[in-house]
Image (cartoon, rainbow, N blue to C red):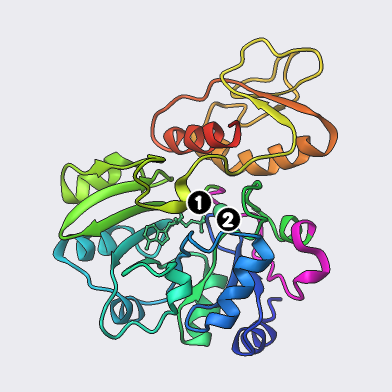
């Protein structure tokens, strides 16, 4: 069973732990402790200009840290707990360290749905900063074993919450002056958000005007070369299909063509193939629903 006592002791001592969430596994630290947060940046080799998401376990914990406009409240009611992050104006009572925000006056918050994440944050009683538990730029981890493979002895505790149900990072929206902007697609789609608050804008990886520094350029990348939208793989390429397995297929993201299943398999399959191939080719993935988020990650992984 899960070792919450050890987890809370480590977090209280300003140490890092591996934490399961429904999106991907996080590298977790006390978000209010700048020394602890600095260890996240160091271990991930993450540039300090790329702010972290703080994770909460209640609406009360969230509203102490940021200003919720009417639209932010509606979105929280619709999508929390869940794979949904809001970038909001930080509140006067905010206790999260500046380093976690990369010095910005906005605060990214998520209330995850995973029971282990919720229990740890609630028991700790403070927001937890938790970017994906991988070296910056690499493929995100969707199992406890992936996190151990990534950090080995440098991380003393990884809580095992099973395979991540969703397998792709959260949807990120900014809700500033009641204007909603999509910063990163995820399993909650732009249409899902618009069904709650009406038309929203998007600002996806604009390298010239980064609203969200972490959305820049190459990310989520395996060591192998990655080719997208491939229907005829080369002889030396592993071929990741979508739909029924054919003679060409090395692994299929979903034999039934289910995009949700494909999202949850994506990172684990890429990791697995990365061990034994120098080149990976991926079949075309439809853009509908979570497909947009899968294609977003693949485009940046292939840069
Ligand atoms: P990850 O790196 O997967 O933890 O994702 C966090 C994402 O949220 C990155 O793209 C960050 O740049 C973004 N983010 C976090 N805080 C903010 C903020 N205050 N303003 C804009 N984007 C943010
Ligand atoms: Mg990440």
Identify the residue shown where x is 35% and y is 63%.
Answer: 80
Secondary structure under tag 2 reads loop
Q: Mark 2: few, some, or many residues within 10 Å (few <14, many ≥20)?
A: many
User: Can you say whether 38 is above or below 209 in the image?
Assistant: below
Q: Mark 1: few, some, or many residues within 10 Å (few <14, many ≥20)?
A: many
- Seen in the image, is 25 located left or right of residue 296? right
Check whether the beta carbons of the residues at disc 1 and disc 2 lie within 8 A of each other.
yes
Position in image of residue 54 (x %, y %): 45, 70
Furthest toward the front, the residue is: 208
Q: Is residue 19 visible?
A: no
Based on the displayed image, in which of its 4 quarters is residue 117 positioned?
A: bottom right
Please identify the quadrant where the N terminus is shown: bottom right
User: Can you say whether 95 is above or below 183 in the image?
Assistant: below
Does the magenta portion include 157?
yes
Question: Which residue does the numbered mark 1 point to in the structure image?
Answer: 169
The answer to whether mark 2 is within 8 Å of ligand 2 is yes
- Seen in the image, is 86 located left or right of residue 97? left
Q: Which residues are magenta?
A: 149-167
Q: Is residue 138 visible?
A: yes
Please identify the quadrant where the C terminus is shown: top right
Q: Kindly report the secondary structure that dominates the magenta region of the rendered protein.
A: loop
The answer to which of 40 and 292 lies nearer the viewer is: 40
Identify the residue shown where x is 36% and y is 48%.
Answer: 183
Question: Which residue does the numbered mark 2 point to in the structure image?
Answer: 24
Position in image of residue 26 (x %, y %): 59, 64
């Amino acid at each position: 069973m899960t070792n919450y006592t050890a987890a809370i002791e480590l977090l209280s001592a300003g140490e890092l732990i591996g934490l399961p969430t429904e999106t991907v596994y996080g590298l977790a630290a006390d978000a209010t402790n700048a020394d602890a947060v600095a260890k996240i940046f160091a271990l991930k080799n993450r540039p300090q200009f790329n702010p972290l998401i703080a994770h909460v376990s209640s609406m009360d914990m969230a509203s102490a840290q940021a200003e919720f406009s009417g639209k932010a409240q509606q979105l929280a009611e619709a999508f929390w707990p869940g794979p949904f992050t809001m970038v909001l104006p930080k509140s006067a009572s905010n206790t999260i360290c500046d380093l976690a925000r990369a010095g910005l006056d906005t605060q990214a918050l998520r209330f995850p749905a995973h029971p282990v994440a919720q229990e740890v944050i609630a028991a700790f009683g403070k927001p937890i900063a938790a970017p994906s538990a991988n070296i910056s730029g690499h493929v995100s981890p969707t199992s406890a074993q992936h996190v151990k493979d990534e950090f080995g002895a440098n991380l003393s505790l990884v809580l095992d919450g099973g395979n991540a149900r969703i397998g792709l990072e959260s949807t990120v929206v900014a809700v500033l002056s009641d204007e909603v902007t999509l910063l990163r697609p995820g399993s909650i789609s732009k249409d899902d958000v618009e069904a709650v608050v009406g038309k929203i804008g998007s600002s996806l990886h604009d390298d010239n005007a980064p609203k969200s520094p972490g959305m820049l350029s190459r990310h989520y990348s395996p060591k192998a070369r990655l080719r997208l939208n491939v229907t005829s793989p080369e002889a030396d390429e592993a071929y990741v299909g979508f739909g029924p397995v054919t003679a060409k297929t090395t692994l299929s993201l979903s034999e039934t063509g289910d995009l949700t299943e494909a999202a949850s398999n994506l990172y684990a399959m890429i990791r697995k193939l990365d061990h034994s191939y120098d080149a990976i080719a991926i079949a075309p993935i439809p853009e509908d629903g979570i497909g947009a988020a899968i294609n977003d990650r693949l485009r940046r992984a292939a840069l």
